[in-house]
Amino acid sequence: MIRRAVDGAVWTLTIDRPEKANSLTRAMLGALLEHLEAAEGRARAVILTGAGGVFSAGADLDEARAGLATDPAWEALSARIAALPCLTIAALNGTLAGGAFGMALACDIRLAVPGARFFYPVMKLGYLPQPSDPARLAALVGPGRARVLLMGGAKIAAEEALAWGLVDRLCPAEDLPAAARALTEDALTAPEGHVGRIKAMIPRIWSQG
């Protein structure tokens, strides 16, 4: 399920299926998209996080076999995140894998806990990544490291992800919610539309992917 918590103009969307490593079903993708659409014009900041010790393992295995792994819903979700005029933060409470990468890559800021791991096994599974993900990934870590993840099947630890630029800061798990919330403070007090104007000034090479 997807939980939504609204604290003023900060919306926190939590993937809450820890017994299945927060793997995502088609219904959950739809719920996330609905929450994000509702946030436009109402939220100054959106924080994406997960329950338990994993952010998301990607697609639910049963639904992946039935076609979810290549469903356009993943691309629609990451496109919606990227298009939001508010600040978006991925508070990665644990491992990020597979299709869930798209959500994190589309966010403005990525925080992670030290124990998180990152992998995107499209080569092994025989799937193509989401259309926008390779360009977004390469914009963050460079083309060579993007190939290491997408083509070499590498699993990297949080410290390496930080060094590569895949995540922006590491935070202990107990501090992660507060750290994400602290990064929204300036957006909350900025003039109307100011967040979107600053976002538009920051180069987004991956937006063309």
Image (tube, rainbow, N blue to C red):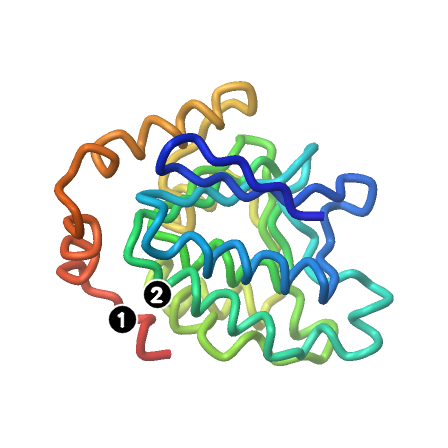
Question: Which sits in the foreground, 63 or 141?
Answer: 63
Q: Judging from the image, what secondary structure is the residue with disc 1 in?
A: helix
Q: Which mark is residue 27?
A: none
Q: Residue furthest top?
A: 174
Q: Residues within 10 Å of mark 1 (few under 14, many from 20)?
A: few
The residue sitting at the right extreme is 62
Q: Position of residue 106 (x, y in %)?
A: 41, 60
Question: In the rendered view of the protein, which quadrant contains the C terminus?
Answer: bottom left
Q: Which residue is mark 1?
A: 205
Residue 1: x and y in percent read 72, 48
User: Disc 2 vs disc 1: Cβ atoms closer than 8 Å?
Assistant: no
- Looking at marks 2 and 1 on the same chain, the residue that comes earlier in the sequence is marked by 2
Q: Secondary structure at mark 2?
A: helix
For image coordinates 86% across by 66% down, the residue present is 62
- Which residue appears at 27% of the width and 71% of the height? 205
Report the front residue among 71 and 162: 71
Could you tell whether 25 is left or right of 209 in the image?
A: right
- Splitting the image into 4 quarters, where does residue 190 fall? top left
Tell whether 205 sits left or right of 95: left
> Residue 22's x, y, as percent?
72, 47
Residue at the spot 15% in from the left edge and 53% down from the top edge? 198
In the figure, residue 74 lies in which quadrant?
bottom right
Give neighbour class at mark 2: few <14, some 14-19, many 20+ (Cα, 10 Å). some
- Position above or below: 73 against 97: below
> Relative to 181, does residue 105 appear above or below in the rendering?
below
Q: How far is disc 2 from disc 1 in space, using C-alphas?
A: 14 Å
